[in-house]
Image (spheres, rainbow, N blue to C red):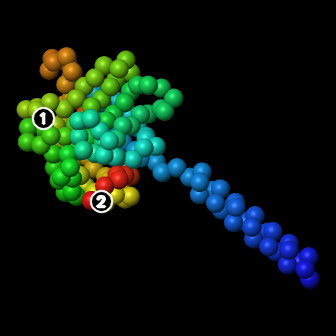
Amino acid sequence: MKTKALILVVITILCGCMACKKKSEEKILNTASCKIDGALISFTSESAFNKICLFSTYCNGFTPNPDVSYPLLYIGFPSTVATGTVYDPSVTHFSVTYLDQTGYKYHTTAGHSFTLTVTLWGGNGNRTTGTFSGVLYSAEGIADSVVIENGKYDSKIWYITTQ
């Protein structure tokens, strides 16, 4: 009888350990995709939108392949993020930056056409989704640009403060 009880306890512990292992191996996938000058690119990130960002209050960076440095897509929001917000660079400070395969940088520029719409902002520990499109201009000037079409993102939000 004691042997059967011991075997049952061991099986229960092993099953519990296997369940814990599966949960720790799961990764939350944060994604973004868009057409850049007509070519569809899908990006991923293991990081969530967070409050550690140089140019915006919330930001996240996405890459199509974590094993390479470029291309990269960064999206940054101001602190007033809310579901239904539509951002335009001539009205509100936000940032979308694209670094191509060579590391050449394009970004949102005030006075030029680019919109970012937040379709969901769930707050700390939840998710954000949205769409974006427009023209990003070279850091060297507005003569060089890339057209972003049908952009969308889906990412977790993380921050330490109590908002």
Whether 79 is drawn above or below 62: the answer is: below
| Left or right placement of residue 37 versus residue 144 in this view | right
Secondary element type, mark 1:
loop
Question: In the rendered structure, which amino acid carries the disc numbered 2?
Answer: Thr
Residue 148 in view in this figure: yes
Whether 80 is drawn above or below 36: the answer is: below
Residue 84, labelled with which disc? none
The percent position of residue 85, horizontal first and vertical second, equals 17, 53
Farthest-out residue, bottom: 1
Q: Nearer the viewer, residue 150 or 135?
A: 135
Residue at 60% over, 51% down: 25
> Pointer 1: what residue?
113
Secondary element type, mark 2:
loop
Quadrant placement of the C terminus: bottom left
The percent position of residue 135, horizontal first and vertical second, equals 19, 31
Q: Quadrant of residue 23?
A: bottom right
Q: Crowding near pointer 2: few (<14 within 10 Å), some, many (20+)?
A: few
Whether 144 is drawn above or below 149: the answer is: above
Q: Nearer the viewer, residue 94 or 38?
A: 94
Residue at 34% over, 58% down: 124
> Pointer 2: what residue?
162
The percent position of residue 109, horizontal first and vertical second, equals 14, 30
Question: In the rendered structure, which amino acid carries the disc numbered 1?
Answer: Ser
Residue at 7% over, 32% down: 111
Q: CA distance from mark 2 to mark 1?
A: 34 Å
Q: Crowding near pointer 1: few (<14 within 10 Å), some, many (20+)?
A: some
Q: Quadrant of residue 54?
A: top left
Q: Are marks 2 and 1 in contact (CB under 8 Å)?
A: no
Q: Quadrant of residue 127?
A: bottom left
